[in-house]
Amino acid sequence: MHLSRYALAWAGPALGIFCAMLFAWRVLAGDVQQPPLPHFAIAWTTLLACLLAGVAALRSRTSPALACMLQAGALATAGSALGLNPWYFIFKPLAMLCALVAVALAMRRDGPARSGSGLLLAALAASLAGDVFLMFEGLFIPGLLAFLLAHLCYIALFKRGQHWFAHHGALALTLLLGVAMYTFLWQGGLPVALRLPVAVYVLVIALMAAQAWGRWHEAGRADRPAALLVALGACSFMLSDSLLATSRFVQPLPWAQLWVLASYYLAQALIVTGLLCRATPSPQAPGKAGASTPRCR
């Protein structure tokens, strides 16, 4: 029974590795001519990322569902960067679906102890909707609104049990970066119709990052590593959106999709991993009080 359950859990990461091998073969051997160096590097990096995600799941460093999320994200990123649309259209929504499965399984395992999972599911579902909208031309505004909702859910989630913006330095810095980015976009040719929606979005994502750092600032010693992952994920989210906006409204960036999606999936993976980590008692040494160490599932 345990063996069959283990095999079922590993079917996803194993399939992800197989898909990465197919992708590498498609890029490296699909054409008679030798692929350019960037294509060669992206293909092997994608395969390596999928292998590492699978090994991390095997060693219980992450859950199989989160490993599948990382694998799907790597394949979506590479597919988009190389213009392989079928890979991009399949694996981009699949990445967030795997993240939703990871959170749902954590809720099932922990039950009421997994507080805030509803908000996390809502944030990931809104991100999934935003991903789908941004895959099609003419749906930028719905995509922007979907990610705005995701960030609002993240803010509410990061606020649970915490003060508002406890790290004042982080709040000042994220707001300053937001103002600088918005000014850059305005001067770079941001369309008039998008100035207000983008201003609201920039403010909300800056507040999301500030609340994440405030959460880290107030976290206890055992919870700080997990809270740091969440805060770094929020910063990676800001980076991803900044690259996307710059390439879309100011000047197209070389390999824009590669950097935008790589930083986006890194952001989501860090946030989900940090939020699914939990403090568990470590073995007590003789004569010493038990400590707590974060454990991620």
Image (cartoon, helix red, strand yellow):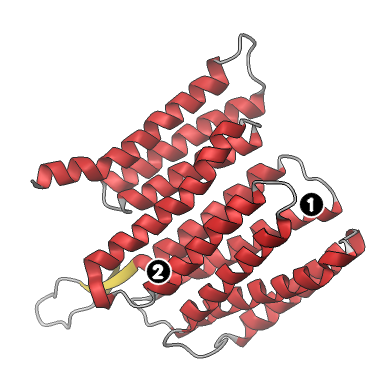
Residue at which label 2 appears:
275
In terms of secondary structure, where does tag 1 sit? helix
Q: Which element type, helix, strand or loop, lies under badge 2?
A: helix
Q: Residue at x 40, y 51 (%)?
A: 98
As displayed, is residue 96 above or below residue 118?
Answer: above
Direction from residue 222 to residue 288 in the image, left or right: left
Q: State the image coordinates of residue 232 (x, y, percent, origin top left).
A: 53, 65
Task: Answer above or below: position of 227 versus 70.
Answer: below
Who is closer to the viewer here, 7 or 173?
A: 7
Residue extending furthest bottom? 163
Residue pictured at 51% horizontal, 48% vertical: 93
| Front-most of residues 227 and 190 | 190
Return the residue at label 1: 248
Q: In this view, does 10 lie to the left or right of 5?
A: right
Quarter that holds the C terminus: bottom left
The vertical placement of 75 against 32, above or below, is below
Pointer 2 or 1: first along the chain: 1
How would you rate the neighbour count of disc 2 (Cα within 10 Å): few for under 14, some for 14-19, many for 20 or more? many
**x and y percent of residue 236 in the render?**
59, 60
| Residue 105 image point, x, y percent | 29, 60
* Badge 1: residue crowd in 10 Å (few <14, some 14–19, many ≥20): some
